[in-house]
Structures are given as structure tokens and as C-alpha cells.
Amino acid sequence: MKHRNFHKESEENHLPQNPNVPSEELTIVVGAGLAGLSCAFELAEAGRSVLVLEAAPYVGGRTANWNENGMEVESGFHKFIGYYTLLPELLERAGIDLNEMLFWEKSMETRHPESPEPGVFGLDVIRAPLKTVLGALGNNSYLTPADKASLIPFFAAGFKDYVARPEELDEIPLKEYAERHHVTEQALERILEPLSSGIFFLPPEQYSSYAFFGLFAPGIPRLHKMRIGAFSGGMTDVMCRPLADAIERLGGTVRTSAPVKSLIVEQQTVRGVELESGERLMSANVVVAANIRRSQKLVAEHFSAVSAFRPFFDLEAMPHVTAQFELPAPLLPQDRTTFGPGTQLGSFGEQSRTTFRDKPGRTSIILVDPDALVDLPEEEVWQRTVDSLREIGLEGVDSATDYRIIRGDENFYRLSAGSEKKRPKQVTPIPGLFLAGDYTKQPFLATMEGAVISGQRAARGILKT
């Protein structure tokens, strides 16, 4: 699959505001990530006038791909979870075929430096039930029966506390909760660490127990849909740009390379936005759907004294660091999600047969403990990546032909203990101001499904007014 150059395409797509739409009927959405696009789609489908403004020269936000100095990269190592419901329903309404957009994986793999062989676990209860059952019962050289048994009371108590006392559960770091329930050290490192740090970067001693169980709890009633999908191309190419195109077919406008400088506020009511270029755009409503830090800055400029926003302003962002590289041959024999507990590797996977099919070998890796990595020189981050891959027996990285370190510190809210109570709602107490983003209050945490839920809730708030 060829990946289009969205830097060039976005310049052609820099459209002016529709002069025929009165400002009192227009909603401006700041940010063209999944949260902003889902909000805009709902409004456009309901017949509302909507303008999406994106600072980057491409749409997608945290689910994007672009050309980084001659190499095609993505915002991170993302996978589509089978028990999502609102995201696939949204994409279907937008005319996007999930069967063309995704490759469904049948298993996942965990590699630990001290394990004689990797653990391979089935994912698809319906389509591969035997592999799923054997994966849970087997893999005894990776995780002993005693280690597995120690996880049973831990998960039973955790899901119970997730429902019965979520606020208390959120105050307990995952490692502490595991120790309270006598999880063995090996089970903590080889199973719980991949399912926490491998997905959202933070080490278990910082990671919220509520966030851990909250990621899996929605899948319990949908076990028959518990599978992982790899994208069939860059996420902008196969998901977010088609979603933006659907918004425009419905009469909305999506502008890229249009960074917003500030909100326009009159008499404690949001009336529009001012762009970095100085252009002022007036509207009936503004949905701030930028990343968490940018959203906090936009809101705090005018509403720092509003008590309802104080928890939101205290919600911390966390950095993210990924290593992405090309090789003359695949690094792994299958394109599937792999975890590297006990190393700098969170989750990663070969992608030359799925997302980057025009490359003979292509891998993306989420690196754990990003606080320690985000400010290091690229060469040092890359060397740590190479060393970690060698630790788990993947010597093929020595033949890498090109690499990029993709990082930032504004895109994710920190899923540490005590963060849940700080997440804001989508409908704010300020007239004309709405929020959308997976950092806002919704049950799917920092996921694609969570972003869509937040955008849809913001849209419902606007439609009710």
C-alpha cells in the first residue's frame, strides 16, 4: 500500500470558512483527532454546520501517519480492539469497511529475557477457541501454574472493586494492589506488566489499579469479540482521512495547518477562536478537542479562576516515546502484538505484512518509562531499543536500514493513581464551550473508543442546546 504525502495534500485542503454559514449556527471543533472528527461527524450528520481546525498538516492526531524526513511513520503502535462498539459503528456510518481497514490477529506473544521460550496466547475465543484455551492452560515454561493461580484472586477482587469502589481502587498503584492479593513476582512482571506498561507506558508502581481493570472490564460481557486488529495502512490513510472526507460530504469543513491561538470570549461566553495567523472565526459553540496540554492552555487562558476546572488543570500529561524502523527483512515471523517485559520494550510488532506492506521489514515499538527517555538524544534511545531487542533474542535489528524516534509530552493523560477524579466532563459550565478527548470522563480511558465516546458526548451536548 502506498502512503500519500499529506504534507502536500493538506496545503491543497486549507479551505476558508464557508461565508454562507452564519456564525450563530456554526460549531468549531479544535483538533482533528478521533475525538474531534467523531464530534464533527455527529454534528454534520444531524444537519449542523461544523468547521474542524487542525494544527498539523494532516488529520488523525494521536491516530495518524505522516512522512518524517523521508520515512513513513505513525503516531504510535496502535491496535483496534474487537470489543469496541461505538468506533466501528461510527466508521460504518462514514462508509469505511472494517474488513478492508483491519487484519485480525489470532494470538499475541510475550518475550522475557529470562524465559527459555516466549509465551503465546490465543485471542479469539470464537474463531480460535482451542488456541485460546491452550494458551491459558499452557505456556508453563513462561509462567508456572502457581504463577497463574496467584492471578485468580487478584482479578476477581479487582473487577469487584472496579464496580463497587472505583474511587478507592484508583488511589492504589497496580503493584501495591497485586502485592495485597499475593500475586507472585513472576506473574507481576510477565503478565501484569505487559498489560499495563506495555499498553500505557507507566511502570506498575505508578499505574492506577482502576485504569488497569477499567481497560479490560468493558470486554468481559463481550468476550466473544475479544480480539486485536492491525491496521491495513497508516491510520490517517485508512481511517481518519476517510472520516474527514465523510464529514465534508455531509457539508462540514476540515482545515489542516490551521493552529488555534486562543478562544474568543465575551461576557464569560465562548464566541469563537483566533488562529495563529490572526484570523478570527466566530461561532455558536467551540469544542476543544486538542491534546490534553493544549486543551488545558486554551481553557486556562480565560477560565483559570473557574473552580469547576481546577481538577482538570491538575490532571497531568505523560510523555510517549516510540521507536520505528525499517529492515531488509521482517524482524518477526508474524505480524502480531508482542510484549517485552523486563526490558525497555512495551509492546511492538512486525508490520511489513499489514500496515507497511511496501516495506520488506518494518517494526514499531512503544517504549516503557517514557519519563526517563523523552529528553534523551535520539541515538541513546535507539541504542536502548537495540539492546532490549537483543535481550529477547531479536538480533535482526542489527540490519536496520533507517529509524525514527517519535515522541512528545502532550498527547496522553497520566494513568497514575489518583487521576480518575480529575478528568473533566465534555459539557462544561461555560456557555459555548465543550471538551472532547479521551482524557475527558468516559469509561474507556485513553483508547480510540474512549476518544469517540467523548466526541459523541460533546456533540450530544451541543444538539441538546
Image (cartoon, grey):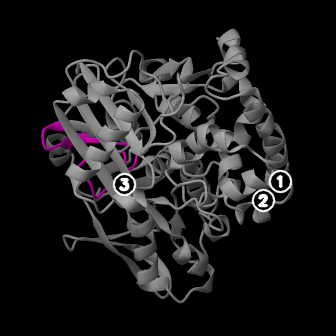
Which mark is first along the chain, 1 or 2?
A: 1
| Cβ atoms under marks 2 and 1 closer than 8 Å | yes
The C terminus: image quadrant:
bottom right
What residue is disc 1 on?
161
What residue is disc 3 on?
52
Decide if residue 253 is in sight here: yes
Determine whether 96 is above or below 126 in the image.
below
Q: Position of residue 453 (x, y in %)?
A: 60, 48
Could you give the CA–CA distance between mark 3 and mark 2, rounded to whole angstroms?
A: 35 Å
| Cβ atoms under marks 3 and 1 closer than 8 Å | no
Q: Position of residue 296 (x, y in %)?
A: 45, 73
Task: Decide whether residue 65 is among the magenta residues.
Answer: yes
Could you give the CA–CA distance between mark 2 and mark 1, rounded to whole angstroms?
A: 6 Å
Which mark is first along the chain, 2 or 3?
A: 3
The N terminus: image quadrant:
top left
Which mark is first along the chain, 1 or 3?
A: 3
Determine whether 165 is above or below 193 in the image.
below
Could you give the CA–CA distance between mark 3 and mark 1, rounded to whole angstroms?
A: 40 Å
Left or right side of 284 for 408: left
Name the residue type under label 3.
Val
Specify start and end residues of the magenta stretch as a single range: 51-71
**Foreground residue, 83 or 29?**
83
Left or right side of 227 for 293: left
